[in-house]
Amino acid sequence: MKDMNGKLPHIVQYQGSKRLLAPQILRYMPHKINRLFEPFSGMAAITIAAANDNRAKRYYINDLNEPIVRILQSAINTPDELVEKYTDIWAAQFTYPGGHLEHFYHIRSCFNDGKQTGENMLYLLARCVKGAVRYGRNGNFNQSPDKRRHGTNPKNISSNVQAISTMLKGKVEFTAIDYRKIFDMAEPGDLIYLDPPYQGVSNAKDNRYFCGLSFDEFSASIAKLDKQGIDYIISYDGECGGRSYGLDLPSNLNCVKYVLNAGTSAQATLLGKKSTTFESLYVSKNIASKVEYAI
């Protein structure tokens, strides 16, 4: 289902997406999986990449940010409806009184007033700065619009969601619950791919992000997966320009750490520097021993 340029389909830009790293991550993933769980799905880049490669029988998409899950559920189960609703919102910005920026703020207000539909969330992501989800202290979406563009063209949205729907329709369950509840559902033969908020931005007091994540609680939860014999792959922190972001996961966990080259840092480039970003990947030893020969 790759497009003519060999790229995996994606719905919309999303800060922190693992879409570009997906080919590297899949090298560490078994070829036959009963169920692939993605508890911190974002826009589910790894689920889409795995489905494109027919890695799992079933998929489980979860994210605490429920409107994000609504986008994915609509894209996979009712792609035509999602595209139609998004097109209506996207087209309205060109005739909106006050212009396209005021239109963005109008949709943002509707979203914050309770209309947290998949199409509204999709439009906000398509138009906001860096495709970055940000929330204020009051829980409202507060990211600003990118003034240089009008958001992803509906034609591009359409071709991508149709491709994603073809791969995944009828194979996915969707939830918006705590990741630890997802762990309770997994069984041997399943794989959990985790891309939690990085330590540098996951403090619960940091209101730019939807939620925080305790390092100690997360590490303890992974230890429980080890005891249950559940395989997992974790994208967690890394380094850029010689600076490390966050602590390594504890050495007592039953996993192997690898380092992936994520390419040139866009943020460093904006600052006139050229730095390569490296991201840590932790792979449970059971599957690491089987794929290591191919790395």
Image: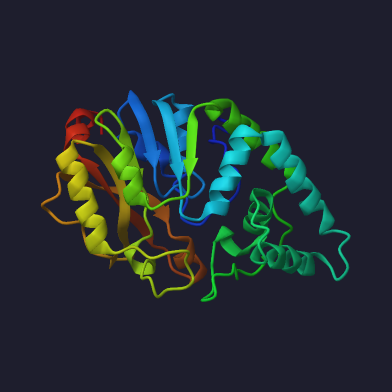
| Residue drawn 67% across the image and 66% down it | 113
Residue 96: x %, y % from top left: 86, 63
In-front residue for pair 263/8: 8
Q: Nearer the viewer, residue 257 or 43?
A: 43
Question: Which quadrant of the structure image shows residue 107?
Answer: bottom right
Colouring scheme applied when the structure was drawn: rainbow
- Determine which quarter of the picture holds residue 116: bottom right
Q: How many marks?
A: 0
The C terminus - image quarter: top left
In this rendering, the answer to whether 270 lies above or below 229 is: below
- Quadrant position of residue 165: top right
Residue 84, x across and y down, in percent: 77, 41
In this rendering, does residue 110 appear at all? yes
235 or 208, which lies in front?
Answer: 208
Say if residue 4 shows up in the picture. no
At 23% from the left and 37% from the top, the residue drawn is 230
The residue sitting at 71% across, 64% down in the picture is 110
Q: Which residue is depicted at the point 42% across and 73% down? A: 206
221 left or right of 179? Answer: left
Residue toward you, 61 or 202: 61
Q: Looking at the rendering, in which quadrant would you find the N terminus?
A: top right
Residue 227, percent across and down?
Answer: 15, 41
| Horizontal and vertical percent position of residue 234 | 30, 47
198 left or right of 100 in image = left
